Amino acid sequence: MTPVEILASLFPSGHSVSAEGDLLFGQGTLPGGAVVQVVGATARAPIGIDQAIRLSAAVLEIARSDDATPILFLVDSASQRMSRRDELLGLSEYLAHLAKSLLLAEARGHRTIGLLYGGSAAGAFIATALACGTLVALPGAHPEVMDLASMARVTKLPIEVLEAKAKTTPVFAPGLDNLVSVGGIAAVWNADESLADQLQALLARPRDGDDRAALGEKRGGRPKSARIAGDVAAAAQA
C-alpha cells in the first residue's frame, strides 16, 4: 500500500497529513471523531540528522499537549544516512534523541503506534518503529535490525554459520515473520480490511508496560527473554 492508500483507509472522514520531503506530518480523524496525530518517514529514504531532528520536533510538540492524542508513526525507510557529514555531526545522538522523544510522548499519555508498511533497517528502524510503544505492520513490510552480511562483519562469524542459525533462531534473521516471532511486531494488519477499524481496536486495548518479551516467549521466538528480564527486575528490587 502507498501512503495515500494507507491514509485513506485509516481516516475515511479526512485528514490533513501532508508531505515535507520524504517526511509526513499532520493529523487524521477516525470514525467517531477521535483525532490521531501522524508523523512518517517514507519512500525508503535514509534518516539523517535533518530528518531525525525534524521528526523529534514534531513529536515533542505533540508531547507538550495534555490532550493524550495518540501518535501514529508511518515507517518506510532505509537505514540511517551514513554520510560523513551526518556521522561527524553526531548522527547516533540525533537518533537517540528521536527515540527518547517518542518515549517521552508515551510517558505523557500519548500512545505511540508505529505502522511499518515498507522497509526499515538498523539505527533508523530502532529510533522510529521500534521506539514506539506498539509496532504493527502491513504484509510485505521488510524490517532489518541488521542484515546477515553486516552481522558477519561485526561478529567475525562466517555468513554460512549465521545463515544456518537464522533458520532456527529468529533473532538472527531479518524479515517480517521473524520480527513477529520475537515479539517486536505486535500484529500484522489485514490490508484488505479497514485500517481505521484495526487502529481503533488497538487503541481500545489498554497498554500496560512493554509486552514484547512476553509476546516473544508466547510465540516461541524468544523463549527465555521474559523470564530473565523478570529475574533481573526482581533482583534489582530485592
Image (tube, rainbow, N blue to C red):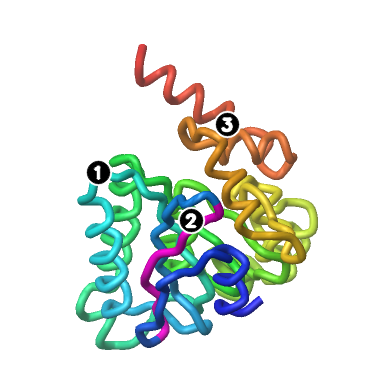
* Viewer-side residue, 11 vs 205: 11
Q: Are marks 1 and 2 in contact (CB under 8 Å)?
A: no
Mark in the foreground, 1 or 2: 1
Residue at the spot x=49%, y=37% of the render?
Answer: 210
Q: Is residue 30 magenta?
A: yes
Calculate the distance from the C-alpha at mark 1 to the C-alpha at mark 2: 24 Å
Residue 152 image point, x, y percent: 59, 70
Q: Of marks 1 and 2, which one's residue comes earlier in the chain?
A: 1
Instruction: Examine the rendered structure and indicate whether residue 124 appears above or below residue 96.
Output: below
Residue 93 visible within the image: no
Q: Which mark is residue 130?
A: 2
Instruction: Examine the rendered structure and indicate whether residue 162 appears above or below residue 208.
Output: below
Instruction: Examine the rendered structure and indicate whether residue 41 appears above or below residue 33.
Output: below
Q: Is residue 155 left or right of residue 123?
A: right
* Viewer-side residue, 167 vs 230: 230
Mark in the foreground, 1 or 3: 1
